[in-house]
Image (cartoon, helix red, strand yellow):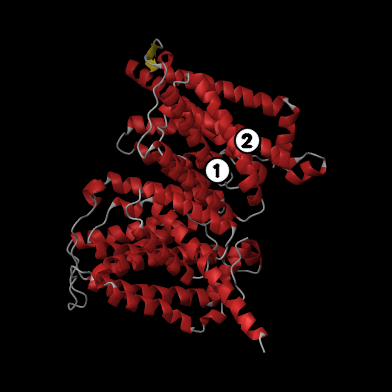
Amino acid sequence: MQQFGSDLVFILLFGLSYGLVLFICAIGLVITMGLMHVMNLAHGAFAAIGGYIAVGLMNGAGVPYAAAIAISVILVTLFSLVLERLVYRRLYHADHLEQVLMTIGINLIVIGGLTICFGPNLYPIRLPDFLKGNVNLGIREFEIYRLFVIALGLVVVVGLWALFDRTQFGAKLRAAVDNRSIAQVIGINVDRMFQIAFGLGSGLAALGGAVGAAMLPLEPYYPMKYLLLVLVVVALSGFGNMKASLGVAIFVGIVDTAGRFLVPEFGGFIIYLLLIVLMIWRQDGLFARRNA
Amino acid sequence: MISIDSSRSLARYRFSAWELLPAAAAIAYFFVRPDYLSLGAGIFVTAIFAISLDLLIGFAGIITLGHSVFFGLGAYAAGLLARSGWAEPISVVLLSAAVAALAAAVTGPFVLKLKGLPLIMVTLGIAAVAYEVANKFDWLTGGHDGLPSLTYAPIFGLFRWSMYGTTGYVYSFIWLTVVILVARMVVCSSFGVALQGIRQNALRMRVIGAPVLLQSVIIYTISAALAGIGGALYAQTNSFVGLDTLSIDQGVFALAMVVLGGIGRLYGALLGAVVYNLVQDSAQQWNPYYWMFAIGVMLVLVVRFGKGGLLGIASDLGNRLLARAGARP
């Protein structure tokens, strides 16, 4: 019983930290899919670049952990704004095939570029001392790092909630996601909204990549490897449903953790099988909105 | 919008002299590089795979990132048949194609109800699961070691699988020809025209009473069977099947070939596969990731500037030359 409780706490906390990183990585894509219906398969590339810049700054230049993450988030945000102008702007009215080809192309370029800059192998992160080791939670020991990730994830969630639910920008953004043309008619500059949301989402992806680097290891193939998990969160939350995406991300994190922990032999793909079935069964997402 | 010329789709049924060009090139290669026929056989195999993908993407508008599943299934079916002692090569190819087709026919009705991002996600997911399953069931598939040293009986009991790959070259060329003829027949039939309608506007097709889902499943199955043929030939010409055949990259790179040569043109997929493999072969010493970089740049450039790919550019040039010749008195 003791063991069971201990395992349960482990799975829940581990899954929660994993799910929150997924959420941070995916929320930008949820917003941009909802807003512009652009199939951005290169979203994971922003997370990868963010992770590489942060870890590179720490390993190479000795920049402190927090500063390295902040710098990488800022750089990726700026980079994404440039890319939005140059590439994504042209994709808004393109068909799906064109969007897929273009963003896969970007993915492959990023994979190649990361290899050229950082080599083809895993790029390990050395966590700062204050995040190393375990802490006793009474029922079992747990990594400080993962608790830190959970805390940070919750801060991001609260921050996004405040932004979307309590500011005028958030209200406009939600209006634009719900009904783009009406939002435009009442004078909301949807293109501008999208630009800001795109930058914000890419910056958050970079944050997820950097903070989660000890969890989702950095490697050049990162943008394709975690693409599926990010897409799953977007698709299952019903396009553009930001609140549902938090639930879906945590659900995915916990189920995947439980699968790997309880049936290590097959844990790796239990989650995918489940998601394929869910996706086919509930095409509009797990928490489909009725008042669309 | 990547536009595909649909007005001439039925006109294409008439056989054009241009279509002999690939065969002529294949015969020329046979005499020019008899020492390197394995490359040629490899090109034929990937071309078959690329053509099968073009049927889905270029004609029916089904955007899948999981086409590697059917190539891999065909390859493993051929490998396992050889392992269990079934060595007659042609029946192995047909059986492998049937396995891939069956998988498509069973999953198609569920998968093809989706479109857009969910479809991409699910096809990607199925490909990821297939790879992991093959990896875990190593008692059957050999896991990371794959199925090495497969042997097949001589074709028709006459042509042995030689070390120089002469048999493999001619054999896979004949299969490629068969695949092109089948694909051509499908595309030029009224069914093929219906597929173009589905790509352009599935809703309207449904409104005029076309069984959209059924037609999608049929082309999905045909395409899977052709991909399975490619996979089986891969197993036979390499005497080896590995996890690579199921890797998602296979599907992505095949997509790159189709785009490079020109989407929705069948021969575009063929040309794309040829160019892709020749360039890759001459860049063999490159790090494979640099190669990814190059493919990425190519994809971005083609989407940005040359929607029709290489064949599109060539036919534009040809039309312009014809126009100029016509303008002259």
Gap between marks 2 and 1 measured at Cα: 21 Å
Give neighbour class at mark 2: few <14, some 14-19, many 20+ (Cα, 10 Å).
many
Residue denoted by label 2:
A199
Question: Residue most toward the right?
Answer: A186
Q: Is residue B16 visible?
A: yes
Of the numbered discs in the image, which one, if any, rests on residue A235? 1
Badge 2: chain ID: A
Q: Nearer the viewer, residue A133 or B270?
A: B270
User: Which residue is at a point 32% across and 34% down the rendered structure image?
Assistant: A263
Quarter the C terminus of chain B occupies? bottom right
Badge 1: chain ID: A
Q: Determine the secondary structure under disc 2.
A: helix
**Quarter of the image where one finds residue B69:** bottom left
Compared with A273, A4 (above or below) is above
Q: Is residue A37 visible?
A: no
Looking at the rendered structure, the kind of residue marked 1 is Ala
Residues tagged by mark 2 and mark 1 found on one chain of the structure: yes
Task: Say whether disc 2 or disc 1 marks the residue closer to the N-terminus.
Answer: 2
